[in-house]
Amino acid sequence: MADHTHALSFGAAAAEYDRFRPPYPELAVRWALAGLSNGRVVDLGAGTGILTRGVQTLGHEVVPVEPDPGMRTQLAAATPGTTALAGSAEAVPLPDAAADAVLVGTAYHWFDREPAHAEIARVLRPGGTFAPIWNIRDDHVDWVAELGRIAHLDDKSGNIVVKYADFGPAFGAIEAREFTHRTTLTPDEVLGMIRTRSYWLTASDTDRQRVERELDELLATHPALKGRETVELPYRTLVLRARRR
């Protein structure tokens, strides 16, 4: 993966990651897998299985692949009957044409894309689907933008359609679709979510104290947050989808 220090930092907070990170809306997952019935789906960079469980509820067989042992342990605990394979986007431990679809939940930006695309194409059957999915906080909302500034919450989203609009010669044209959803969190859970981010996990104690102090001030003073027992954190979920040639 592109940045091993940050990409492999999440295992230390795997239980919190599984608890506080948002799910993927069902409509987004259904669109990613449109036309597939009872398929075999690889969840690449599966983390703690948040996307794995979403795909399972649609009736598909899911094969999670995850490099971090801490994340794999949490996935097994939270997803009975499922064991993640140790592997990466650049080295998928599956035979050729073994999958009907490969999904990636908010992990694609960690991949070394050229070798990853070759591996994804290898494990997909002809006509199979490759679909990265991102949950992106909606920073058009002012307090969400301020939250991102305080905690250095760079989702690496930018203009994703432009930035990641080439999956390589093995894939056809990329389609894109955006969905919206919200998660409801207490103020403590907002902090819990922040503590699962790569910036926090690799930050110094001084930087962590600064984040906590500024976040407490935001929650206590912003008109949309002040005095509330829960807050609604809005997300845009972006899906890119292409077929294996």
Image (cartoon, helix red, strand yellow):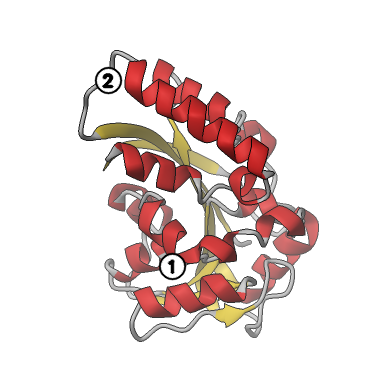
Q: Is residue 180 above or below residue 44?
A: above
Image coordinates of residue 113 in percent, x first then y, are 75, 54
Residue visible at 37% across and 49% down in the picture = 22
- Looking at the image, tell me whether mark 2 or mark 1 is earlier in sequence order: 1
Mark 2 vs mark 1: give the one in front: 2
Question: Residue 55 location, x and y as percent?
Answer: 36, 65
* Residue 226 circle label: 2
Q: Position of residue 229 (x, y in %)?
A: 20, 34
Q: Foreground: 142 or 28?
A: 142
Dividing the picture into quarters, in which one does residue 91 lie? Answer: bottom right
Instruction: Determine whether, in the image, residue 7 is placed left or right of residue 10.
Output: right
Mark-to-mark CA distance, 2 and 1: 33 Å
Q: Residue at x 27, y 32 (%)?
A: 231
Whether residue 67 is visible: yes
Residue 5 vs 38, above or below: the answer is: above
Q: Quadrant of the C terminus?
A: bottom right
- Can you identify the residue that label 1 sits on? 49
What is the tally of numbered marks visible in this picture? 2
- Whether the residues at callouts 2 and 1 have beta carbons within 8 Å, the answer is no
SS state under label 2: loop
The amino acid beneath tag 2 is: Lys
Callout 1 amino acid: Gly
The tag on residue 34 is none
| Left or right relative to 103: residue 217 | left
Q: Secondary structure at mark 1?
A: loop
At a point 38% along the width and 40% down the height, the residue shown is 190
Query: What crowding class fits label 1: few (fewer than 14 Cα within 10 Å), some (14-19), or many (20 or more)?
Result: many
Q: Position of residue 210 (x, y in %)?
A: 58, 31
Q: Quadrant of residue 156?
A: top right
Circle 2 crowding by C-alpha within 10 Å: few under 14, some 14–19, many from 20 = few
Task: Please name the residue shown 53% across and 70% down the image.
Answer: 71
Q: Quadrant of the N terminus?
A: bottom right
